[in-house]
Amino acid sequence: MVMINGAGIRVTRGDSVRFTIHLTGRDLPDGTLTLFTVKKRAWRHEQPDIELEIPVMGNDVEVIMAPDVTDIEAGEYVWDLRVLEDAAEGAEVLTPMEYASFEVMEAIGDE
């Protein structure tokens, strides 16, 4: 199960997830990289529980998480997306959004 309400995301642990984030404001060149992260607490310098480097294609970022990626401990997390401009030249990091909730729920029933 996947549920997206505004920027808040709920997923069942171990499920596949696929959604698109459309970036507005200015055109980004195809191939600009983004970093999608999920971690327990915002503002803490800790290893993310999920970290995906995703290229921008026509101002869209297609987030695809396989079951092994979402197979993390059930609970409350936060997610954000950062744009890495000029990645080949020592990227400037831009954060186009505030972090949002990411909830991982346990599945009910037998496997």
Image (cartoon, rainbow, N blue to C red):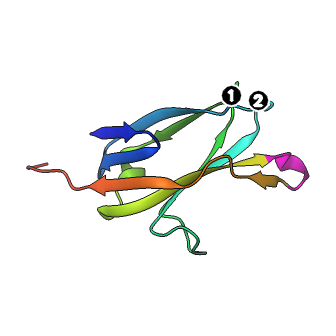
Count neighbours of disc 1 (C-alpha within 10 A) and say few if under 14, some if 14 to 19, many if 20 or more.
some
Left or right of 32 in this view: 9:
left
Earlier along the polypeptide chain: callout 2 or callout 1? 2
Residue 11 percent across, percent down from the top left = 32, 47
- The amino acid on which the numbered mark 2 sits, given as a three-letter code, is Asp
Instruction: Name the residue furthest bottom.
Output: 45
In this figure, which residue is indicated by the disc labeled 1? Answer: 57
Q: Which residues are magenta?
A: 85-90
Instruction: Name the residue furthest top.
Output: 58
Question: Is disc 2 placed on a helix, strand or loop?
Answer: loop
Residue lying at 41% horizontally and 53% vertically, measured from the top left: 102
**Which quadrant of the view contains residue 59?**
top right
Front residue of this view, candidates 78 and 64: 78
Quadrant placement of the N terminus: top left
In this figure, which residue is indicated by the disc labeled 2? Answer: 30
Question: Is disc 1 placed on a helix, strand or loop?
Answer: loop
Q: Is residue 63 above or below residue 47?
A: above
For the residues bearing labels 2 and 1, Cβ distance under 8 angstroms: yes
Specify whether residue 89 is in view. Answer: yes
Residue 5 percent across, percent down from the top left = 38, 39
Q: Is residue 88 magenta?
A: yes
Residue 36 percent across, percent down from the top left = 58, 50
Residue lying at 41% horizontally and 43% vertically, measured from the top left: 66
Left or right of 53 in this view: 6:
left
Q: Is residue 19 magenta?
A: no
